[in-house]
Amino acid sequence: MKLSKYFFTGITRNIIILGLVSMLTDLSSQIIFPLIPLFLTSLGAGASIVGIVEGAAETTASFLKVLSGYFSDRFKKRKLFIFIGYAISTITKPLFALTKTRPLVLLFRVIERIGKGVRDAPRDALIAESTETKYLGKSFGLQRSMDGLGSVLGAIIALIIFPILWYQKTFLFAALPGILAVLAILFVKEGRKYKVEGPKSIKSIKSDEKTLWHSTLRPSTWWPYKLGLIEWLKLLPRHLILFIITATVFTLGNFGYAFLLLKTKAIGLTDYNAIFFYVLFYGVYTLCSIPAGMLADRFGKKTILQIGYGLFIPLSLGLIFVSSQLGILLFFVLYGIFFALIDGTQRAVVAELSPAEYKATALGVFHTAVGIVALPAGFLMWFLRDKRGPSSTFLYASIIGIIAFVMLIAVRREKATG
């Protein structure tokens, strides 16, 4: 009973509903997304077309995240942007069932990612506003855990129903959990309102940008009511910007589970084994996300991130030498733990370091930065793998991990006011 009470302490209704929304949406998405490359291939597309579709979709989402965060802060609305974002993603899923041409697949895939770009920053800001600061790690951990659970369930359902329903009917089926997710958003409430005192004239705010930057007046005491996006971004605290840069650098070396799956093939395992390891990774990530968030609240978010970044370094180096099924099993488990340690915690750090009046903007900058560099980083790691072999990719990842770990030490623990 005490453990159950401790677990749910600080978890509000909004956190639970948003977690459920993430779970249902990711369940819906993971039924479809693994099939998109196969579907394109069935329409006669080559590997380059598949890469263009996925790259265009993710780039679109990345650029939109900072904009949606900015407008969410500007109008002080979270729920509206969350609803629109999830609705766009849900509406496009059954449209895949109606298309038989590659350009339309590209169009619908990009539109679906537009939904993600619209919703992510306002949703994370609402999570931060729906809980006390001391429970931020747990709240983001719960949301990421339910998101991971949706991924696991979606992949399992896809394996079961695809041989029976094939492409079109599977795409239609995938829309059902998405519709439930959108309906659940109706029960979400806007976060706590904040009152900000300060000048409302853009002229008075711009009158001494140097003073504002170097903060004899703290940025959080200014209300950037009429500022444009660029001026708004200049108000972000320096220690927050340093952390976002650190997380972005780390993303340059975070190779992702795709390289782990290729490692299973390299040591002679079958495609079925690879799928099992994929589910194992997400299962471990899902189980560990909430405990990781609770540890971040208890021992400090920066400390947990240092453990996560530190774990990534030997994990990367070890993948150069692992050659057994038992060994790769261990590395999938460790990668799931590592990802659970950093995924929700990084969001919690951004939320904690950002002033209340532009929290969604800060989260949007974070999501956009790591999303944009993920594309060239992925290209570079694939290039290294093709030209120098898989070991070069993991060596490169470990070097980037060391750089990011050192940079993380310089990030201040100071919390934003508001």
Image (cartoon, helix red, strand yellow):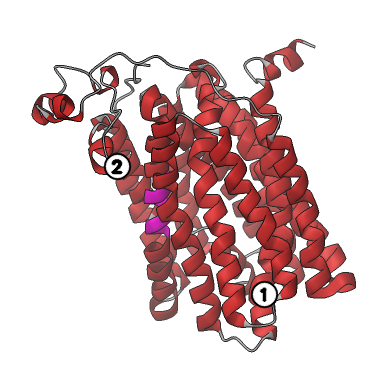
Q: As rendered, which of 350 and 317 lies closer to the eye?
A: 350
Residue 411 belongs to the span the image colors magenta: no
Q: As rendered, which of 346 and 118 lies closer to the eye?
A: 118
**Which residue is at 25% across, 21% downward?**
222
Amino acid type, mark 1: Gly
Instruction: Give the crowd class for mark 1: few <14, some 14-19, many >=20 residues within 10 Å.
Output: few
Answer above or below: position of 93 versus 335.
below
Q: Which residue is mark 2?
A: 229
First in sequence: mark 2 vs mark 1 = 2
Q: Secondary structure at mark 2?
A: helix
Residue 370 belongs to the span the image colors magenta: yes
**Which residue is at 70% across, 33% downward?**
186
Q: Is residue 276 visible?
A: yes
Q: Which corner quadrant holds the N terminus?
A: top right
Q: What is the magenta range?
A: 367-374
Q: Which residue is mark 1?
A: 268
